Amino acid sequence: MFKAIRRRFSKSNDAPAKRIEQGNLPVHVAIIMDGNGRWARRRGLPRIAGHHAGMHKVRDVIRACDDIGIQCLTLYAFSTENWKRPESEVEYLMKLPEEFFRTEIDELVSRGVRVNFIGDTSKLPSFTQETVRRTLEKTVHNTGMQVTFALNYGGRSDIVSAAQSISGRVNAGELNWSEVTESVFSNYLSTADTPDPDLMIRTSGEVRLSNFMLWQAAYSEFWFTDVLWPDFGRAQLEEAIADYQRRKRRFGGLK
C-alpha cells in the first residue's frame, strides 16, 4: 500500500505547474506543514531558522490558494503533541504568529481573507492568545477565503471534546442519544462551520495524519510530497490540485 502511495510523491521543488481545471477545484485544502527542522539541518542552520522559513511559505501558499480560487485552507501549525519539543523551540514557535500577522495582516485584509483558529488556544501563552484575538477581530467581517490555523490542535482531543459536549447536553435533557447522528456529531467539532477537507497535503515525505482532522479526513484525497515545507510552492500546490482533479471520488459508492 505505502509503496503505491510513494509512487505518487512529487520529488522536485521546481516542477512545472500543472494545468488546473477551474470548474473542479477542491473547496477545502488542508496542509500538514512538515520538514522545517530537516530543511534547516541540511543547511547547517538551527531548527528555528527552518520554522522562520516555513512561516514565509505560509504567506506564499495563502496567496496561491486565494489566486487559484480555493475557498477554505487549513494549516496544521502546532499540534497538541508539539509541546514535547525543547522548551526553547516551543517558545520560538509561540512567537511566530505575532510576527506573521504583524507583517501580513494588511494583505490578508485587502484580499478579504477571514482567519480562523481551531485547537485549545486557552493553553497558549498570553501574548499568543492576544495575537489570536486581534487577528480574529480584524478579519471577522471578511467574506473571502477562510484560512484556518490549527494551533494547539489534536484530532483526538477534538473528538473527545465533541463527545463531552454532547454528553453534557444529553445529561441536561437537552438532547436525546437517538438524535446523535454523524451530522449532529460533526456540529460539535471545532470545524463545525467548515466543510470537510477535499484534499489533504503533507510535505517532507512522511505518510501519516499525525493526529490531524481525524474525523474530518474520512473521505479526503491525500497527496504526499518529499518536498520540505520551506521549499513547497505554487508548483507543488498546483500539482496536488491537478492530481486531485484526475481522481474519481465515490464516497463508498459507485459511479
Image (tube, rainbow, N blue to C red):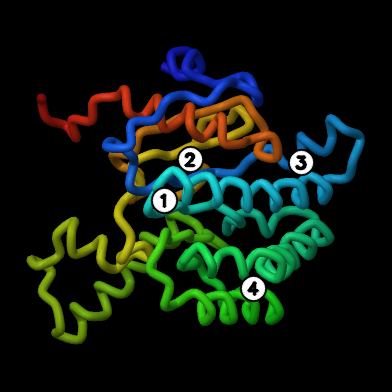
Q: Secondary structure at mark 3?
A: helix
- Distance CA(mark 2)–CA(mark 3): 18 Å
Q: Amino acid at mark 3?
A: Gly
182 lies left or right of 140? left
Q: Are marks 1 and 3 in contact (CB under 8 Å)?
A: no
| Residue to which mark 1 is pinned | 213
Q: Amino acid at mark 4?
A: Leu
Residue 165 percent across, percent down from the top left: 31, 75
| Residue to which mark 4 is pinned | 124
- The answer to which of marks 4 and 1 sits earlier in the sequence is 4
- The answer to which of marks 2 and 3 sits earlier in the sequence is 3
Residue 94 visible, this angle: no
- Distance CA(mark 1)–CA(mark 2): 8 Å
| Residue to which mark 3 is pinned | 37
Q: Is residue 12 above or below residue 98?
A: above
Q: Secondary structure at mark 4?
A: loop
Q: Amino acid at mark 2?
A: Leu
The residue under the point 48% across, 60% down is 148
Residue 106 percent across, percent down from the top left: 62, 70
Q: Amino acid at mark 1?
A: Met
- Distance CA(mark 4)–CA(mark 2): 23 Å
- The answer to which of marks 1 and 3 sits earlier in the sequence is 3
Residue 44 percent across, percent down from the top left: 91, 35
Q: Quadrant of the N terminus?
A: top left
- Distance CA(mark 3)–CA(mark 4): 22 Å
Q: Give the farthest residue toward the front.
A: 110
Q: Give the farthest residue toward the bottom.
A: 172
Q: Are marks 1 and 2 in contact (CB under 8 Å)?
A: yes
| Residue to which mark 2 is pinned | 209
